[in-house]
Image (spheres, rainbow, N blue to C red):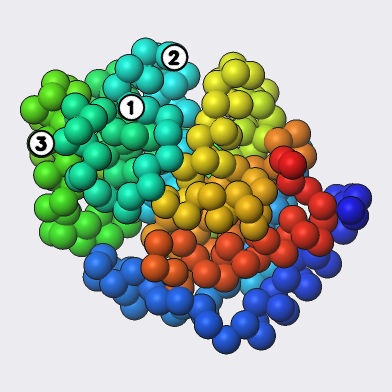
Amino acid sequence: MTTTSSLAFQPVLERIAEEIERTPGRGRAADYIPALAACDPRSFGMAVAELDGTVYGVGDWREPFSTQSITKVFTLALDLAREGDELWEHVGREPSGNPFNSLVQLEYENGIPRNPFINAGALVVTDRLHSRTEDAAGELLSFLRAESGNPAMDFDEEVAASESAHGDRNAALAHFMAAYDNIDNDIPVLLDQYFRQCSIRASCADLALATTFLARHGIRADGTRLLTLSQAKQINAIMLTCGTYDAAGDFAYRVGLPGKSGVGGGIIAVVPGRCTLCVWSPGLDERGNSVAGVAALDRFTTLTGLSVF
């Protein structure tokens, strides 16, 4: 096992980027969201952020991309900080084993989504945060701007509109859960909030920095506490078991870190007490995870020996 000092992160990232460049298959960009379909699947960026805010990067690490489901981690943190364990009466903490937009489990689980990172669960969390803030998407954007130090981060209105125009399945999920009294807000309002939060554009550097509160066990960049130690542990645990859709077991096996992916091609990962990472490459596998992103994180933990195991 290699002990990695802060100064060694940059050459590790450069070695990974060279290896990824030689990899022939990179998957395909998400085509069911037209605004994402045009992304070059061979784009690649990776960043590591230390707990003091020092960031290392390689490739397209400062290129903003569509965060998509990565934002579910931050919305979960913001709501859990406000309502605590009451949240878990409305959403579970178990891996789904089904596609992220599946309606199947809701039927026999009485409208309670299996976890906060499948679409149904994220809709519940967004709904509950919106009830507490009156602007869940705005609250999320403010948080990400503050933690990343990038006040220019913003929504991508084209992506939000594209998702809204192709959002029938998410609407069906929301209406189904509302029938079980597990949604409080009007469905059109909830969907608008949800699509806007998924449309936020951020770079690998932005997201690596914004995630460091989880590596600091709940402490924000300004030194204030967002989450208790237990809450930070809970989110990291759910990321490990549920963060990469129905490929979470394989991701834990290969990478060994809490992580969360998005169909925009990004993945964030946490080394508790040490650093956070974000990798981006738009080419996806059949489960919706970045092919090059998973490979890069696999190489990072192998080369550095940094994992939770």
Marks 2/3 in contact by CB < 8 Å: the verdict is no
Give the mark nearest the N terminus, 2 or 3: 2
Q: Residue at x 53, y 31 (%)?
A: 235
Q: For the residue marked with disc 2, what is the amino acid?
A: Gly
Residue 39, percent from left and from top: 40, 75
Q: Helix, strand or loop at disc 2?
A: helix
Q: Residue at x 61, y 33 (%)?
A: 214
Cα distance in 3D space between marks 1 and 3: 16 Å
Q: Residue furthest front?
A: 108
Q: Residues within 10 Å of mark 2 (few under 14, many from 20)?
A: few
Residue that numbered label 3 is attached to = 175
Residue 304, percent from left and from top: 82, 56
Viewer-nearest of discs 2 and 1: 1
Q: Helix, strand or loop at disc 3?
A: helix
Residue 159, percent from left and from top: 27, 60
Q: Residue at x 32, y 17 (%)?
A: 89
Q: For the residue marked with disc 3, what is the amino acid?
A: His
Q: Residue at x 56, y 41 (%)?
A: 240
Quadrant position of residue 125: top left
Q: Helix, strand or loop at disc 1?
A: loop
Marks 1/3 in contact by CB < 8 Å: the verdict is no
Residue that numbered label 1 is attached to = 91
Cα distance in 3D space between marks 2 and 1: 12 Å
Residue 34 visible in this rendered orientation of the protein: yes
In the image: residue 80, left or right of residue 11: left
Image quarter of the C terminus? top right
Residue 64 visible in this rendered orientation of the protein: no
Residue that numbered label 2 is attached to = 84
Give the mark nearest the N terminus, 1 or 3: 1
Q: Residues within 10 Å of mark 1 (few under 14, many from 20)?
A: many
Q: For the residue marked with disc 1, what is the amino acid?
A: Val
